[in-house]
Amino acid sequence: MNRIHVGVGGWTFEPWRNNFYPAGLAHAKELQYASRQFTAVEVNGTFYSTFKPATFAKWRDETPDGFVFSLKAHRFTTHRRELAGAAEGIARFIGSGIAELGDKLGPILWQLMPSTVFDPDNIEPFLRLLPRDVQGRPLRHVLDARHPSFACEPYLDLLARHDCTTVYTDADKYPSIPHARSDLAYLRLMRSREDCATGYPLDELTPWARGAKEWVEMGARKEAFVFFINGAKERAPHAAKAFLEQWG
């Protein structure tokens, strides 16, 4: 079922070498390898750095058909008090060459500061700035809201009006916000444990896998992205693989 995309955050992490990655695998081959174990990856590097079009094209060419990249937008766009002032940063990020990913371009993740509180007069102008396409390719936008004030109906109303969605996470320190008004579900699972070989016990993964399957079965436009992020990050690849095995 190719409307469920499962993976991890990034593909370069020292503890994954000689653990998840085969011993001796060249660092330059890590994306190629990871993209054949998962069906998606959330790119964290784009949050900190600006990449050139040739880099996005290289990622596209190194990965198999059906693989999808979710891109975390540069922090310059969201780590600001007045989000309405983000127009220049948004345009710079969208125009940086992400369209080179072609069909492998997934959702754009806009991560807000933990201190950003829900204020419609601040959030809605930002949502209005988000472009609907890049070089004719439709864009989908996901907000990662990290302040508990976002766990409210007015926030979901704003997202629905602007055809955006919000992150759902199981992290203790961030709000878990169910959002059934979008066709896109975006999960960031952040509680992998070091003492568990698969990050999560299998009986804890089963409800997530079942929920993702039930979600996409609700309609032909439904899609789910599930990323294992942080927690015991060294276990994240094993958690993602176990999740994929859960729904076959």
Image (tube, rainbow, N blue to C red):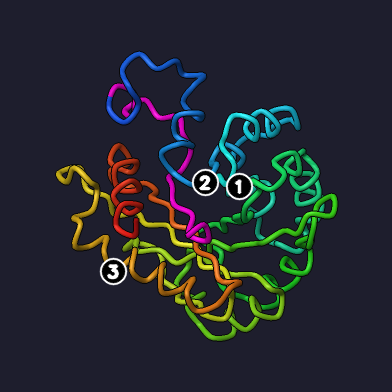
6 and 65: which is toward the camera: 65
**CA gap, disc 1 to disc 3?**
26 Å
Residue underneath mark 1: 71
Label 1–label 2 contact, CB within 8 A: yes
Lower sequence index among marks 1 and 3: 1
Please tell me in which quadrant of the rendered image residue 131 appears: bottom right
Q: Position of residue 89 (x, y in %)?
A: 76, 48
Task: Nearest to the eye among marks 1 and 3: give it.
Answer: 3
Residue underneath mark 2: 42
The question of residue 191 being in magenta is answered with: no
At horizontal 53% and vertical 61% (from top left) the residue drawn is 3
Give the magenta part as a residue range.
1-18
Report whether 133 appears left or right of 63.
Answer: right
At horizontal 44% and vertical 57% (from top left) the residue drawn is 226
Q: Which mark is residue 207?
A: 3
Query: If the image is split into quadrants, where does the C terminus sit?
Result: bottom left
Please tell me in which quadrant of the rendered image residue 118 appears: bottom right
Task: Nearest to the eye among marks 2 and 3: give it.
Answer: 3
Q: Secondary structure at mark 3?
A: helix
Q: Residues within 10 Å of mark 1 (few under 14, many from 20)?
A: many
**CA gap, disc 2 to disc 3?**
22 Å
138 and 103: which is toward the camera: 103
Q: Amino acid at mark 2?
A: Glu
Q: Residues within 10 Å of mark 3 (few under 14, many from 20)?
A: few
2 and 33: which is toward the camera: 2
Q: Amino acid at mark 1?
A: Leu
Q: Amino acid at mark 3?
A: Pro
Q: Secondary structure at mark 2?
A: strand
Q: Position of residue 70 (x, y in %)?
A: 58, 49
